[in-house]
Amino acid sequence: MLVLRLFADQNSRCSPFSLHNILEAGEKPPGHWFGPASICKPIITLLSSGRKNHFILDNLEVYLALDRVICYKEMHALLGRTPETACSMRCQGHFCTLHTGKADPRDGKSFRQRPANRAMLLLIPVMLGSAKSIDISQLSTLFDFVKESAFVGILGGEPRRSIYICGLQDDKIIYLDPHLSQEFVDMSCDQFSAESYYSKIPKTLPAKKLDPSMTVGLYCKDSNELDDLCLRIKNGPMGQIVQSCCNSNLAQQESLSETTFSDTSSFSELEL
């Protein structure tokens, strides 16, 4: 129930990931669409701002792997940072806890109160083909992502139709479709029905029909799981692991825009 309240359909700080807040953080009016890559900006922004009202979010960090480049040192700096390392990274000019280009308002004491070994949500925007459709030769990469034990889902779909990919069945993907009008669920009370938040009938779609633009989500509960994930990914098709990088992903994710990624400037965006 606590997690569902974070996504409640209301314009409130009590629900940081509501559609209202996503539109505001993404600077889009109602009726406009986010692409699989451009949606990463509001996710990062809302996670950071949501920590002020939800201690549960203190246990989670988000790392955006631009161009499928995963910087090992940057991720561990996010997971296990101390006031000293935070100050050091700020001095290097590529660290910002709020991912907005502003200094972190919390003092050193607040840093020490946060969990020392937090979970990591790794977001990897990918382009698996041309402008029209996914490249058949790239399907194996897609399947590798879905079969990965750290896999939590893919934001993607068909042109002008977004879906959430959550599984695999032979050469078909299993997905959830958010485009279903339902009655508003009031989560302000202690008890509420969560039935509408679950899908009773799984839907499938041939993987070859997917739009090539998508964002993959991988989750590690601590730094040990993150290390294991990096060993599995290594420098294979899912991503490139580097110890450090000249162009910091942390710095770039502060200024994300739709033109940051080729999949949002050249390809049709997917309806939120």
Image (cartoon, grey):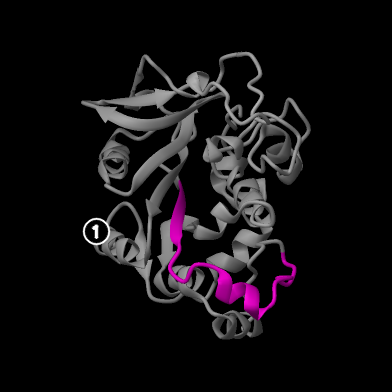
Is residue 196 within the magenta segment? no
- Rate crowding at label 1 as few (under 14), some (14 to 19) or many (20 or more) other CA atoms within 10 Å: few
Please name the residue shown 68% across and 39% down the image.
22
Between 253 and 83, the one lying in front of the other is 83
- Residue 272 in percent (x, y) is at 61, 29
The answer to whether residue 239 is visible is yes
Q: Is residue 92 left or right of residue 12?
A: left
Question: In this image, 145 relative to 26: left or right?
Answer: left
**Residue shown at 43% from the left, 62% from the top:** 69
- The image quarter containing residue 13 is top right
Residue at 54% in and 65% down: 249
In the image, farthest residue toward the front: 190
Q: Residue furthest left?
A: 170
Q: Is residue 151 above or below residue 195?
A: below
Q: Residue 174: image x %, image y %? A: 34, 25
Q: Which residues are magenta?
A: 101-125
Indicate whether residue 115 is drawn in magenta. yes
Above-or-below relation of 54 to 164: below
Q: Amino acid at mark 1?
A: Arg
Q: Residue sitting at 40 percent across and 25 percent down?
A: 175
Write down the residue under mark 1. 232
